[in-house]
Amino acid sequence: MGHDRVVEVLQRSLRSGKTAHAYIFEGPCGCGRRKTALALIQALFCHAVSDDACGVCASCRKVAGGNHGDIHIVEPLPDKRDINIAQLRDVQRALAMRPYEAPRSACIVEPADRMNNNSANSFLKTLEEPPGNAIIILITENADMLLPTIRSRCQLVRFAPLSPEHIGLLLERNGMDAENAALLAPLADGSMQRALELDNDALALRREQLVKHLSTLSLDRIVTVFDAAEELSGNRDETLDTIDMLLSFSRDMLHLAAGCGDVINTTIQPLLEGLVIRLKLQGVLQLADDILETRRSVQRNANAKLALDHLFIRIAGALAS
Ligand SMILES: [Zn+2]
């Protein structure tokens, strides 16, 4: 499913006995990060083999059954947004004690970006030098959301998102018709879980609005910019959907500008071709950068309407020049 490379890297470090003491597993939800973390711990704990998990020894079975006493999972408490400092103090105390039966303790923090600054800071020393050679795995969708001091203490392992083509195929196999699968797949951020959560009708409407606004945006009539931002921004997730559609359009525009016909959004290909002619390759590259930057700021909780105002002004400006 796209992370053979990750498994290979981890296996190589297991074989050479050079696993890191702290990892960040970065990738979209539903792409197998926690499963891989547990497989790594299982291999480190296994009684029978030293560089893999046998799957049948008592230790392997406990890890697989989710009841190994030396694995500590830290996640937000039910109905709490953040991982609080008391939870991290508890786990640090647990890690400082001798493991019950495993050669070392293990700790998974998910989602690690839910540690607020205070709790993250309280965890730094443990990350730098985990007591008793413990292994710590931080799971996140985006390592950039973690403090730089946290990131610098961990080895980053990136899980590739599933490709839109792959997700489209899986959606069709789930019984979705090809056109809807093609609309949803690019918006799923590489996560099958997210693809299944997306609301199809609302998205189709939003896409229609986006296409309409893209064909009327003009700096000469600034109201077209603000109308677009007004109509297309919503809460954070809705705004991110809009931005992801734009990203998918810009991906197609890059392909068109490069002269290859591999287009996902075929129903609006004439519009995209028109935009490519006006923006030229340089403009299309800049557009993709601008969209990504807007995405990052919305992810960091910037005001959605303002962020889209800025983005559409830049697009309108690029189209005017
Ligand atoms: Zn085993």
Image (tube, rainbow, N blue to C red):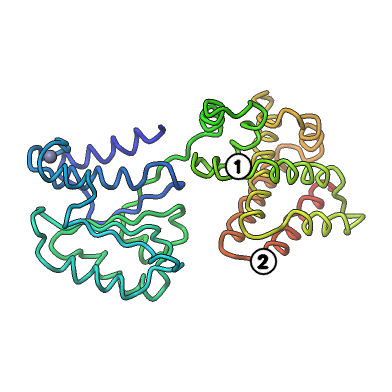
Q: Nearer the viewer, residue 222 or 163?
A: 163
Query: Where the N terminus falls, by quadrant?
Result: top left
Q: Nearer the viewer, residue 238 or 284?
A: 238
Q: CA distance from mark 2 to mark 1?
A: 21 Å
Q: What amino acid type should be assigned to the residue bearing mark 2?
A: Asn
Residue at the farthest right position: 220
Taking the spot 20% from the left edge, 64% from the top edge, the residue there is 130
266 relative to 100, above or below: above
29 relative to 105, above or below: above
Q: What amino acid type should be assigned to the residue bearing mark 1?
A: Leu
Looking at the image, is mark 2 or mark 1 earlier in the sequence? 1
Query: On the picture, is 244 further left or further right than 270?
Result: left
Taking the spot 29% from the left edge, 47% from the top edge, the residue there is 37
Pointers 2 and 1 in contact (C-beta within 8 Å): no
Image coords of residue 236 (percent x, y): 62, 59
Taking the spot 65% from the left edge, 39% from the top edge, the residue there is 248
Judge the density around disc 1: few (<14), some (14-19), many (≥20) Cα neighbours within 10 Å: many
> Mark 2 vs ligand 1: CB under 8 Å?
no
* Residue 165 figure quarter: top right
Which labelled disc corresponds to residue 187?
Answer: 1
Query: Would you name the residue on which mark 2 appears?
Result: 303
> Mark 1 vs ligand 1: CB under 8 Å?
no
